[in-house]
Structure formats: structure tokens, C-alpha cells
Amino acid sequence: MDFVEPINKLLPRGLKTYLNSFPLLREVIERALLAPVDKALNGREIPLYTGIRTMLSPNEREYLYRLAKEVTPNGVIVELGCYAGGSAILLGLGARVSGSHVYSFDPFDSHMDRQTEESDGSPHLNIKKPSRAHVEETLRKRGLDDVITLCEGFSLDMAGRWGNGNINLLWIDGNHAHASQDYYAWRTHLAPDAMIVFHDTNHGRNGFTLGREDTTQSVENLLEQENIRNVYRVDAITAFCLQ
Ligand SMILES: C[S@@+](CC[C@H](N)C(=O)[O-])C[C@H]1O[C@@H](n2cnc3c(N)ncnc32)[C@H](O)[C@@H]1O
């Protein structure tokens, strides 16, 4: 039973939009107020309210942290779709425990024409996207810049240039219209026991209204085609292990 998220959900939409324009205020509210209350009442291992704009639910944040924490020592974690660093931070906190490293890919605020052209309907292009330098500074302030490397570019382009070893944990939250394409592009770099995790899925499962229809379809087709049976689901996350 989560004691904090229901309160967070009750906050008027207008206030949340307002906070998007004042990130420092958001940071104070989340880090000074929500995070300690959430940690105390819900017994969290780490503060899940980081002050960074993200669509992840608290359960999803905790799950990502746990997966990164359980990665084999000196392991490799790849994130496709960083945006402001909301999930990268959780992966980074877990990577710190497991002794692994996170590589996070996003075009950030570069190639905006191409981003608009390839847009998957996500609202991220509606407001100014954070630059790589900005996200790097966010990570540095939280002491995570040594466990996370930000890579500016589009996932399908970057997959062909990957040279940092077998990937143990692949977190796919980039172009939602073609989520399975990212899996197929990166598959060749996966460790034999890699964990693959998608966001924005599970739409319509047991009446679940979050997630996206196109991403859900793309991932369900993949599970079917690859005959994957051991599937883990946490809110809008769908995950599976190759072994
Ligand atoms: C939903 S946001 C990521 C949110 C972040 N993972 C979090 O949980 O806070 C999706 C991000 O993926 C980026 N993106 C879209 N297409 C991409 C691609 N082909 N390669 C890499 N990133 C992409 C978007 O620009 C956006 O910044």
C-alpha cells in the first residue's frame, strides 16, 4: 500500500503544469517533502521522488532501481530514452550498488527537425527539451556522473556503433511507436542472461488505462514472435529475461 502517491495524484493538474515551469520549486517539494515522507511511510530503500520530471510511477522507479542493483558486478546497463534523467538516476543508484555502468541514449535538444519528423506522439517535444549538458549537470549534482554516461543520438543509429561490451540490462523508453525495433536493433549486443525492460506497455490489460496502445501492441507481438513466457509486469512496465 503506497501512502504517498495517492496524495501526489490528488495535486491539481494546474499545479503540476505550473511546477513544470519551475523545476527548482518541483525539486524542493519532491526532495524535501515527498521523498522523506515516502521513504519513511513506504519503507523505500532510496528516495523515489528525485525532483526530475518523469512519467514513471513509484513502483516502476523502485523496480528499475532493483534491476540495476541486481546486475552482475561490472555489468552494463543501457537506457534508450533519457529525457531529463528521471529513470537514469534510478538506474545509476542501482548501478552504484552493483558496480555496473549506465549508458543513456537520447538526442536531447539536438536534431530537433528529425525528432519532430520521427515523433512518436509523446508530449516531450511540446516543451523545450533538456540539453545533454543540462542533464549531465543534474547527474553531477546528485553524485552520479561517474556511473552514468550520456550519449547524444538516436537509438537505431547508435546500436550499430556500440562497442562497450555485452549489455546486461536494456531499458527501452525511447521511440514508443517502434519499441520492438529498438529491441531487435540492440539484440546482438545483449548478454545471454540479459534483462529487457519496456515502458508504456500493458495498456488495456486488466482494465489498465496507462501505457500506450501502440507500444503495448509492439511489445506483445514481440513476446509472441520470440515465444517469451516468463514475463514480469509492473504498472506500465513489461520485462523479460533472455534465459
Ligand atoms: C518518455 S521519454 C524518456 C523518459 C525517461 N526514460 C524517464 O523515465 O524519465 C522518451 C525520450 O526518448 C527520446 N527518444 C525518442 N526517440 C528516440 C530514439 N530514436 N532514440 C533515442 N531516444 C529517443 C525522446 O526524445 C524522449 O526524450
Image: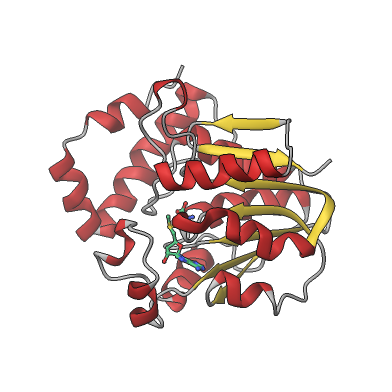
Left or right of 214 on screen, residue 188: right
Q: Is residue 69 visible?
A: yes
Q: How is the image coloured?
A: secondary structure
Percent of width and height locating residue 90: 56, 49
Q: Give 198 or 146, whichever is nearer the viewer.
A: 198
Residue 101 can be seen, yes or no: no
Q: Which is more toward the observer, 81 or 16? A: 81
* Quadrant containing the C terminus in the rendered view: top right
Residue 127, picture quadrant: bottom left
Residue at x 68%, y 44% (from the top left corner): 225
* Residue 196 falls left or right of residue 75: left
Task: Give the tally of numbered discs.
Answer: 0
Residue displayed at 57% across by 70% down: 155
Residue 165 drawn at (x, y percent)? 82, 68
Image location (x, y in percent) of residue 54: 40, 50
Specify the farthest residue to the front: 225
Q: Nearer the viewer, residue 156 or 133?
A: 156
**Residue name at image x 33 percent, y 81 percent:** 113
Furthest toward the left, the residue is 14
Residue 60 screen position, x and y as percent: 52, 37
The answer to whether 55 appears left or right of 79 in the picture is left
Identify the image quadrant of residue 126.
bottom left
